[in-house]
Amino acid sequence: MNFWGIINLKLLLDVLFAVGFGLLLFSRVKEQRTLWLLRGYLFLVSSAWFIQRYAYLPLTSKLIDAVVLACSLSLAILWQGELRRLMELLGTGRLAVLLGNPPKEFRATSTTITQLVDTAGKLSQNRRGALIVVDLGSDLRPEDFLYSGTNIEAQLSTDLLINLFATDTPLHDGAVLVKGNKIISAGVILPLSRQGISRYGTRHLAALGITERFDRCICIVVSEETGTLSLANQGKLERPITSSRLQELLAKLIGNQNTMGANKASLSKNVLSQKTDPGDNISDINKKESEKSEIFINKKD
């Protein structure tokens, strides 16, 4: 009896771990077609396991095993970039990035967004090429690049970014790495993407390459030839875009946690300051409400 209890417990743990692993994979996949492929592959693997364990069907088992092997090889070729990134994250021990838990120190503020948009706009007007990588929680490290560049560790500012991309400086050809409100390094050489080699230049291929490998980072690109603005995210490039569109995308991707907290605190403070004293009579309260309504109407107009 105890033996069968142990067997059932192992089976239960096996199923729970498999389901948890499957849910983790589904939570990390965002593209619909990739999700369909993953569902089909997991269905084949589950069918093979069920037949081998509970049904004595040797020929069917061999056929399903052959199909699973063929699908595994196909997916390995199709998802070679994602699998390489998975092995890199496991090898470097960055499980927080793998599980989708970005550290709080990588989150930027509205000031960061404004400075990035201003920098990109000015560089675009002057047709000065630029490549800005913004780390949103991928915990990018020197080994993630072909060349880690020069360590800067300076407060983010528009003037400093523009100077780093000056054509007469040795760092202008590489990328600038930004984490939170700091410039980490400059002159970084990024891995190139294999997609769209005939369509894009080196800067755009570098932006696609780093965002293909790390989905929690974005890359702002300024074309040196045309001054066109582009934004790379998760291996996809949106171009051309305006400064207002860039600000909209950055606000959506980066978020504004500190501003939200400040707004909540300011709102609470205003609510507390607007509370009336117990000694106020009804006429005074009505008078105050009337004045507030008039002010609100005037502001709305």
Image (cartoon, helix red, strand yellow):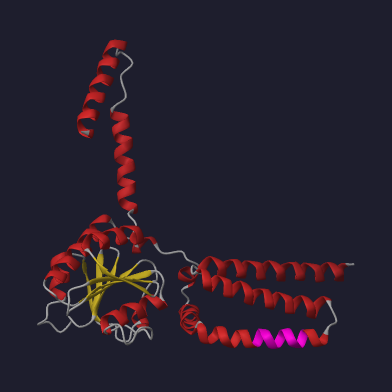
Q: Where's residue 128, x and y in %?
A: 14, 76
Query: Does the magenta run of residues contain 163?
Result: no
- Above or below 140: residue 194: below
Q: Who is closer to the viewer here, 89 or 53?
A: 53
- Above or below 176: residue 69: below
The residue lying at 25 percent from left, 78 percent from top is 175
Q: Where's residue 294, x and y in %?
A: 22, 24
Q: Who is closer to the viewer here, 282 or 184?
A: 282
Quadrant location of residue 145?
Answer: bottom left
Q: Is residue 99 left or right of residue 65?
A: left
- Above or below 17: residue 55: below
Q: Where's residue 247, x and y in %?
A: 26, 60
Give the residue at the far left of this rendering.
168
The residue lying at 83 percent from left, 83 percent from top is 57
Quadrant location of residue 110?
Answer: bottom left
- Above or below 170: residue 156: above
Quarter that holds the N terminus? bottom right
Query: Which stretch did the figure color magenta?
Result: 61-69
Give the residue at the far right of this rendering.
1
